Amino acid sequence: MGTRTAIPIEEYLHTSFPGGDQEYRDGALVERAWPDYLHGKVQGLLFMFFAMLRSRLSLYPSVETRLKMRPNLVLIPDVAVFNPNEPTGTPETPPLIAIEVLSLEDRMSAVREKLEEYRAWGVPHVWLVDPHQRRLYSLDDNLIEKNALTVPELDIELLPRNVFDWE
């Protein structure tokens, strides 16, 4: 992943990038790792899992949505889940859940930094899903592998079969 020439935040927010969206950090564009098929499939299954709960729990899932976390920081989680209200435009308030799906090209140090940025911003549930190793992780004080990812306040339990098995 590389960085390019600095641009103002307003220009970034009104720019689309050929070949995939980029994140924004302190005036610099930051490229994201290219997803493979497995990454895309798991990302889609995560979206569908939460979309199926949408009307019952007022969940609003989205994929690859720019989140303006600070004046000079815009990150793009693979999946964000908002509750109880549907955001508009570029959200500037934390979602209920931010999920990163590992790509083969991801550097774990960069992914962990991104997860910690979500937590510091106030995202209650920060998850990492590794489709290649079929593992689920939650970031609380540390990044911990879990048998299931939960949102206790909404009685949600995401199991490995919900995202790794195409049934």
Image (spheres, rainbow, N blue to C red):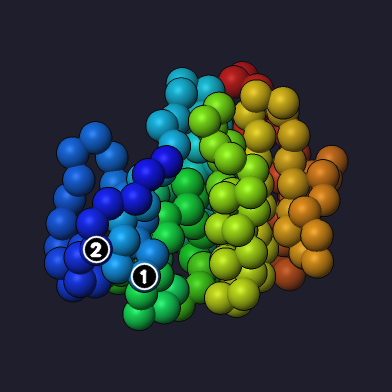
In the rendered view of the protein, which quadrant contains the N terminus? top left
Rendered residue at 15%/67% (across/down): 11
Q: Position of residue 123 (x, y in %)?
A: 60, 70
Q: Is residue 134 above or below residue 124?
A: above
The disc label shown at residue 56, or none: none
Residue to which mark 1 is pinned: 26
Whether residue 61 can be seen here? no
Q: Is residue 95 above or below residue 61?
A: below
Left-right relation of 6 to 117: left
Q: Are marks 2 and 1 in contact (CB under 8 Å)?
A: yes
Q: What's the residue type where badge 2 is placed?
A: Ala
Q: Report the residue that reaches farthest toward the front.
A: 5
Residue to which mark 2 is pinned: 6
Judge by depth and name the residue closer to the eye, 153 or 11.
11
In the rendered view of the protein, which quadrant contains the C terminus? top right
Q: What's the residue type where badge 1 is placed?
A: Asp
Rendered residue at 28%/40% (across/down): 20
User: Dot 2: what SS?
Assistant: loop
Q: Position of residue 135 (x, y in %)?
A: 74, 34
Q: Is residue 5 above or below residue 40?
A: below
Q: Earlier in the sequence, mark 2 or mark 1?
A: 2
User: Dot 1: what SS?
Assistant: loop
Q: Position of residue 89 (x, y in %)?
A: 26, 69
Q: Position of residue 63 (x, y in %)?
A: 41, 48
Give the crowd class for mark 2: few <14, some 14-19, many >=20 residues within 10 Å.
Answer: few
Rendered residue at 64%/53% (across/down): 112
Using the numbered discs, state the Cα–Cα distance from disc 2 to disc 1 in whole angstroms. 8 Å
Rendered residue at 42%/60% (across/down): 75
User: How many numbered marks appear?
Assistant: 2
